[in-house]
Amino acid sequence: MKKRLVVLTGAGISAESGVATFRDSDGLWENYSIEDVATPQGWAKNPALVQRFYNARRQQLPTVVPNAGHKILAKLEEHFYVRIITQNVDDLHERGGSTNVLHLHGQLTQAKGSKDKVKIYDIGYNSIEMGDLAEDGTQMRPHIVWFGEDVPEIINAVELAAEAEIFVVVGTSMQVYPAASLVNYVGKNVPIYIIDPKKPDIEITDNMTYVQAGGGEGLQQLFEILTENLKF
């Protein structure tokens, strides 16, 4: 029986495909302040600006492609029961071949009404314009979990972490909560692999292995470690 491999991914893995991140640039995302484009307050203040920002991010998606890291995660499905928990809002995991992806912070290719938190609309790479209304009559907005909003999928993510037989963290600083707390739900003796060029500011316990590398390189090392262990 295949082991349950759960992978938590962050912006670092998408950065290798050319998707912009903000944590390495003084809180700016594509030259916009996070407060202006990634908070409920920013939406209330200037929804047209927020729409333009995410429309541009959405239009960028078809121009970037999954990298080696995404493809290795998909390849691991041949050997493990893989579940990916991602903080990323792009679709690179799916396009890279992964079949079980939980998006903690929403998806750029989806939209929802300004009030209804349940009804989600698939919009692909199309823009959302001011005046586009949801079924409840409210302005459509990106299906993105902004800073200060609840993270509904965290409940499902916690369940996945608790069921993991191997847990992997790749491309995240482990500073964004509640995602950063997921390692606390992993079983005491479950092996945890942390892949990042910069060692995260957390306590490395006996069951943790730190791999100092970028997503693609580190996941290749991990693939070799995990598949080698299958031979015994």
Image (tube, grey):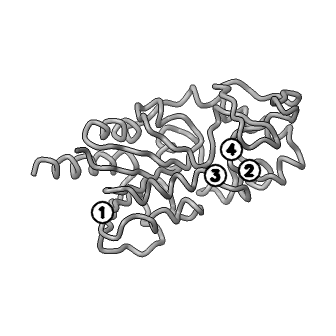
Between the C-alphas of marks 2 and 4, the distance is: 8 Å
Q: Which is more N-terminal, label 1 or label 2?
A: 2
**Quadrant of the image containing the N terminus:** top left
Left or right, residue 126 beside residue 71: right
For mark 4, give the secondary structure.
strand
* Point 71% across, 34% down: residue: 111
Q: What type is the residue that disc 1 sits on?
A: Pro
Between the C-alphas of marks 1 and 4, the distance is: 31 Å
For mark 2, give the secondary structure.
loop
Closer mark to the observer between disc 3 and disc 1: 3
Between the C-alphas of marks 3 and 4, the distance is: 11 Å
Residue 39 x/y as whole percent = 77, 53
Residue beneath disc 4: 144
Residue beneath disc 3: 152
Residue beneath disc 2: 38
Q: Quadrant of residue 52?
A: top right
* Point 40% across, 64% down: residue: 186
Left or right, residue 190 beside residue 24: left
Closer mark to the observer between disc 2 and disc 4: 4
Closer mark to the observer between disc 3 and disc 4: 3
* Front residue (pair 198, 45): 45
